[in-house]
Image (spheres, rainbow, N blue to C red):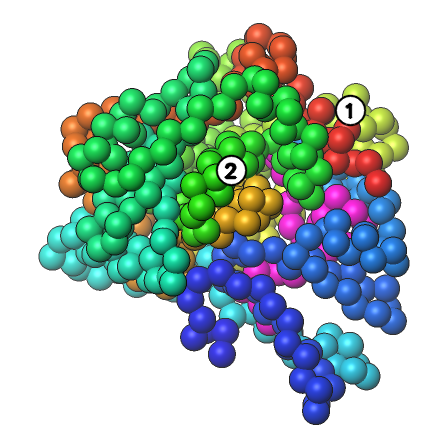
């Protein structure tokens, strides 16, 4: 029955007559499901902290999780920050038998497999096809018995979703703004043109510092992201809205990240990549020869927060060594490429969706929104949508289909990342984004690693 379900889910159903439990998690892993199995009792929850609260699961830190967090900015599945807690694999189902334990485990969805099996088809107008499929996904995600909101930045993904949704329902759009950085004027202009009820939520340093202890309390697992989702979800809650659509997943689906060009180029021409002037001066340049020859290694360099040989200075020699041995970071990344998606685009898309998006963006969206009793839905993270588009994505890898009907002031502006002004709020080092994020990562870990 799992293939008949669309959207996000993680559940366990106990069959009292057969005395067994059926467990499943959605294809992308939008919803988390954690398990602690001590050999006699299996415990499951949607938060790691819930398992610890039961009093029968150790709070010991997993060195692999610590290493993974500092390497990639989030704890990679199947590890969690607690050594005795693991993550149920996305796109899997199994039974727990009263006598035999876990049986009949089955993988019913694989991003890499979807790309591998995608067949080229000639379409009259690929852009129209993409647009129609996205519109269909948005329509499915709008089904609700309560009003639905939309997280609206000035980006292509959220703007396209808001535009599509506004055609069929009265819509409330929400934009986050900071005194130090704001895309609110463009978002507000677009909201006026759509005729939505618009809320712009301005967040300052004082509110951030007031909320920071609760942010750490609800974060569950360490991450360098999620603060923006915390505050936009807070705004949605304040407006009395229970459900909101997010544009997360658009870059992973349509190739919007620099990694889609950088990683294949690095794998094909590692020596040339190292010789490029800007990269030659980058701290990661010295490792291109070692890691840049494979997709997994190039991904680690592209997304890496810290480098493996920097971990001893953060975690100590023993913890870093054990963490890297347990984690096997390249093997973790390689898992997302099994089976081989066969195209450069498919490989990068599988890695970004299975690692950065699942371990960071989706996990952060879950804890930060649920802390405010808001359900975040992701029309661009949809297994049915991927199956429909996978055959054409390697040759149609841009957002022109989503941007086609947007106004020029949104469609033609350069892509910018959305960031929270941590430097100004926490007086972090002012010598580059990477250094600031490293300092933030240390602060997060020191708070989240406590029992």
Q: Can residue 232 be seen in this view?
A: yes
Image quadrant where residue 184 sits? top left
Front position among marks 1 and 2: 2
- Residue plotted at (64% across, 45% down): 76
Image quadrant where residue 218 sits? top right
User: Which residue is label 1 attached to?
Assistant: 314
In the rendered structure, which segment of residues is drawn in magenta? 72-93
**Residue 186 — which label?**
none
Residue in the foreground of this view, choosing between 142 and 200: 200
User: Which residue is label 2 attached to?
Assistant: 234
- Quadrant in which the C terminus appears: top right
Query: Quick one: which residue is furthest to the top in this view?
Result: 430
Above or below, comparing residue 219 to residue 1 in the picture: above
Q: How far apart are marks 1 and 2 (CA)?
A: 33 Å
Q: Where is residue 186 in the image (x, y as percent from the top left)?
A: 27, 25
Please, what secondary structure does the residue beneath circle 1 have? helix
Q: Position of residue 419 (x, y in %)?
A: 47, 24
- Residue plotted at (43% across, 34% down): 259
């Amino acid at each position: 029955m799992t293939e008949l379900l669309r959207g996000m889910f993680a559940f366990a159903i106990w069959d009292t007559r057969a005395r067994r439990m059926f467990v499943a998690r959605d294809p992308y892993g939008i919803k988390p499901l954690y398990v602690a199995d001590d050999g006699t009792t299996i415990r499951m929850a949607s938060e790691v902290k819930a398992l610890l609260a039961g009093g029968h699961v150790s709070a010991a830190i997993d060195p692999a999780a610590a290493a993974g967090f500092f390497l990639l900015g989030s704890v990679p599945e199947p590890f969690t920050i607690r050594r005795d807690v693991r993550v149920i694999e996305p796109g899997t189902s199994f039974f727990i038998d009263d006598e035999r334990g876990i049986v009949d485990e089955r993988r019913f969805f694989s991003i890499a497999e979807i790309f591998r099996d995608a067949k080229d088809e000639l379409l009259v107008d690929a852009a129209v096809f993409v647009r129609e499929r996205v519109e269909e996904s948005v329509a499915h995600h709008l089904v609700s018995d309560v009003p639905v909101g939309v997280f609206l930045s000035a980006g292509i993904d959220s703007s396209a979703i808001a535009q599509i949704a506004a055609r069929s329902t009265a819509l409330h759009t929400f934009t986050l703004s900071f005194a130090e950085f704001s895309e609110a004027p463009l978002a507000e202009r677009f909201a006026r043109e759509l005729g939505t009820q618009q809320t712009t939520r301005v967040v300052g340093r004082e509110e951030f510092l007031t909320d920071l202890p609760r942010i750490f309390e609800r974060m569950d697992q360490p991450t360098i992201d999620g603060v923006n989702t915390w505050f936009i979800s807070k705004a949605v809650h304040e407006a009395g809205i229970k459900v909101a659509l997010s544009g997360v997943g658009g870059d992973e689906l349509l190739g919007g990240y620099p990694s889609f060009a950088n990683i294949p180029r690095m794998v094909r021409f590692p020596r040339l990549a190292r010789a490029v002037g800007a990269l030659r001066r980058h701290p990661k340049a010295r490792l291109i020869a070692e890691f840049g020859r494979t997709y997994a290694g190039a991904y680690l360099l592209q997304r890496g927060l810290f480098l493996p040989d920097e971990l001893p200075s953060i975690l100590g020699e023993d913890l870093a060594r054990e963490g890297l041995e347990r984690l096997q970071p390249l093997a973790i990344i390689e898992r997302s490429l099994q089976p081989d998606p066969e195209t450069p685009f498919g490989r990068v898309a599988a890695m970004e969706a299975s690692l950065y998006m699942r371990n960071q963006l989706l996990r952060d969206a879950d804890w930060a929104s649920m802390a405010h009793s808001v359900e975040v839905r992701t029309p661009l993270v949809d297994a049915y949508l991927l199956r429909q588009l996978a055959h054409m994505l390697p040759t149609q890898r841009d957002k022109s289909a989503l941007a086609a009907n947007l106004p020029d002031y949104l469609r033609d502006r350069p892509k910018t990342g959305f960031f929270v002004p941590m430097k100004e709020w926490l007086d972090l080092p002012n010598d580059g984004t990477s250094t600031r994020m490293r300092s933030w990562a240390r602060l997060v870990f020191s708070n989240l690693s406590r029992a």
